[in-house]
Amino acid sequence: MFASPLDLLKKHIAMILLTGAIVALAVFLLTILMPRDYRADAQVLIISKTRYGVDPYTTVKSAERVGENIVQVIKTNDFYQKVVANPGYKLDTTRFTNVTERIKRKRWHNTVDASVIYGTGVLNVSAYHRNPEQATQFAAATAQTLVEKGWEYVGGDVIMKVVNDPIVTRWPVRPNVLVNTVAGFFVGLVIAGVWAMHQRRHLLS
């Protein structure tokens, strides 16, 4: 009598766990050998000019909608040009030069990011770079460019102010070694489990 799928998995548990561990180790080694990025975060407050009779809740919601638009604007080539043209920062732009427009935009997308902190009217600006100082410089330049040029994208009824200067992470955050390793372990488990079930079907045929 053939074993049930659960019994079969229990029978091969050692092999399944070993496969998971091997795949996790391989992913871990591959991840630590890959170039890794630090992240710097700055916060920008979006202030909508209050009209008479408008309650604070509506004002914050208006700021959030503006923030959602800015999140998309930051990814554009026009905004990139404004950031790198800002004379107050020492930005290493070599990875954006002598490449196609498609590659340049992809690299810019991977360098800067932004997200709205809902309920606050605050926009979190993040920048990624292998050099922590460059991550800080890109985050600072992006935030300051929003303050100086953001009105071009959202109109004159909005004021932006940097409320937190960039702080860089102590350790690289991308790619994430822990997440990748754990994911690799579970992928290994699935591969070994599928193999065991395939062997069972082969015996039944």
Image (cartoon, rainbow, N blue to C red):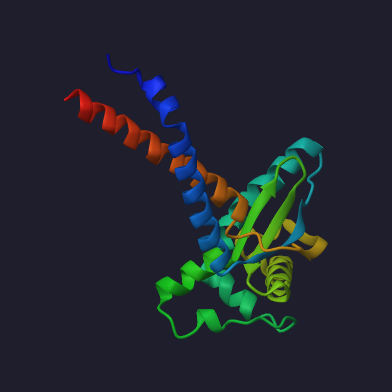
**Looking at the image, can residue 187 be seen?**
no
Q: Percent from the top left, x then y, of residue 150?
A: 67, 64
Q: Residue furthest top?
A: 1
* Position above or below: 58 against 164: above
* Position above or below: 172 against 101: above
Q: Is residue 94 left or right of residue 157?
A: left
Residue, x 33% and y 37% (percent of image)? 195
Depth check: give the residue in front, 109 or 145.
109
Q: Percent from the top left, x then y, of residue 32?
A: 58, 64
**Looking at the image, can residue 44 be seen?**
yes
Q: Percent from the top left, x then y, of residue 108?
A: 54, 69
Residue, x 52% and y 50% (percent of image)? 24
Depth check: give the residue in front, 54 or 136.
136
Residue, x 61% and y 59% (percent of image)? 113
The quarter of the picture where the N terminus appears is: top left
Q: Is residue 10 left or right of residue 85?
A: left
Q: Residue furthest left?
A: 205
The quarter of the picture where the C terminus appears is: top left
Q: Quadrant of residue 176?
A: bottom right
Q: Percent from the top left, x then y, of residue 203?
A: 22, 27
Q: Is residue 45 left or right of residue 28?
A: right
Depth check: give the residue in front, 16 or 175.
16
